[in-house]
Image (tube, rainbow, N blue to C red):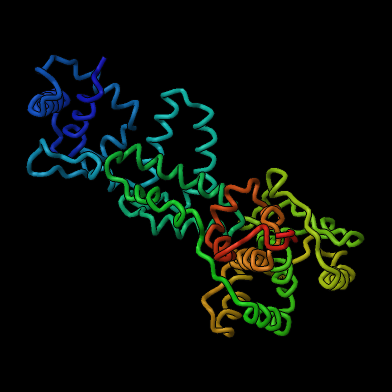
Amino acid sequence: MIPEEIYKCFKKYYLNKNKLTACDSIYYAQQELQKQKKIEQPYAYVPATFLRKLRTEFTQEQIEYFREAVSPTTDTSMVDDSYSHSNMLFENAADIYFRNLKSSNQLEKLMQQKTCYNNHLHEIFGNMKIKDIDSKVIAKYKQKEFDNGCSLNSVQHYVMIVKNIIKNICPDKNNLRDIKKRQNESYAPSMNLLSENQIEKLLNLSYEKYSWAYPIIYLALSTGATIPELLALKWNNINFKNNTIFLKHFLYGEKLILNRGNSTMRTLVIDEYISNLLKVQYKEKSEKEEFVFRIDNVEAVQQYFEEKVLTPISEKLNIPKLFPSDLQHNFVNMCLRQNIPITFIQKSVGYYGITNFIKTYRTLIENTENKFYSPLRNLKTSH
């Protein structure tokens, strides 16, 4: 059996442009470890054993890539394996990570994480070098996924997979290590919060200039539904008798994704005003349209909503650019300021548990606190 310490050091000598033989790489690795007093003396190892193990961790193409592209330092004994590997494309690192899961027989984990990678990570990170993926890139990715309708809990899971893939290749040099130190900051997405006056102007402007989008904006601000959920809303998901909408799907790109769980798949009450507005549209459109909010000849409907509605509205109101998720954040902010119970808000916006909701909106919750509370102030006592 090969000692892990020697195998790790062997890789530093073998996987670079020096193109040492396996036998020489084993020799130099043991010499280095002996100098560092990590082993007592060199032993004779069969090179084929090291190469077999190497091929369970890397494909032949990846081995050739390292031996063609990775430049060692002048002092070969000081080659930094993690630094060299940080130039690897993320998709190659992901392939190695999943091969390791398979070889260690973690098949359930492999299936689940590879599905998440294919659906949510490969398109964004696949062609990026590992060294270029830092906390700023991750923050931008999280905001995009949240705007696209993914729950923040799901996005955190996808980020965890990114970190696992990078850590597998570069255990010592990870640009994402600082996320744990700033967990509260990294967990919550950026929020563009508006004053009541700005929200009134937003609603008035959308009513006057963007009649198609006005009900979407009104529903998002009044119920806590996300924009992707509203864009996936079908006429048969509206109960005009009870004035409710049933949020069953959300629109992710052009795909209709089924919400999971009792929290994200939920029924929300709508007010009489918006109900009457939708009834008018129902009489006009329901026979030819399955979805409540669609535009003829527009395929990327969410992109259209962002570029043709939210961006120009933001410019006209002279406020920072609004993203789809900002409407839900403002719903939460308004509810908190009106002392509406946190559990009601949490359920309205589709959070499974109160913990993740508080992590996301901790700052807003704290902003509603007073400096002093006395639970006895309304009691009448005889002294």
The x, y position of residue 186, in whole percent, is 45, 55
Q: Nearer the viewer, residue 237 or 308?
A: 237
Q: Is residue 150 above or below residue 303?
A: above
Which of 309/267 is in front?
267
36 to 80, vertically: above or below? above
Q: Going by the image, does 281 lie left or right of 222?
A: right
Q: Is residue 371 left or right of residue 173?
A: right
- Residue 101 shows in this picture: yes
Q: Residue at x 58, y 85 (%)?
A: 316
Placement of the N terminus among the 4 image quadrants: top left
Residue 229's spot in the image, x, y percent?
Answer: 69, 58
Q: Nearer the viewer, residue 289 or 31?
A: 31
Residue 261, placed above or below residue 366:
above
Tell me the quarter of the picture where residue 286 sits. bottom right
Task: Name the residue nearer the viewer: 69 or 311.
Answer: 311
Which of the image's four quarters has the C terminus? Answer: bottom right
Please tell me in which quadrant of the rendered image residue 139 appears: bottom left
* Residue drawn at the location 66% of the way across and 83% of the way down: 201
Q: How many marks?
A: 0
Q: Residue at x 84, y 56 (%)?
A: 236
Where residue 368 appears, as percent x and y from the top left, is 59, 65
Residue at the farthest right position: 241
Q: Residue at x 43, y 34 (%)?
A: 98
**Residue 128 position within the rendered picture, expressed as x and y whole percent measured from the top left:** 37, 52
Image quadrant in which you'd find residue 379: bottom right
Say whether residue 231 is visible. Answer: no
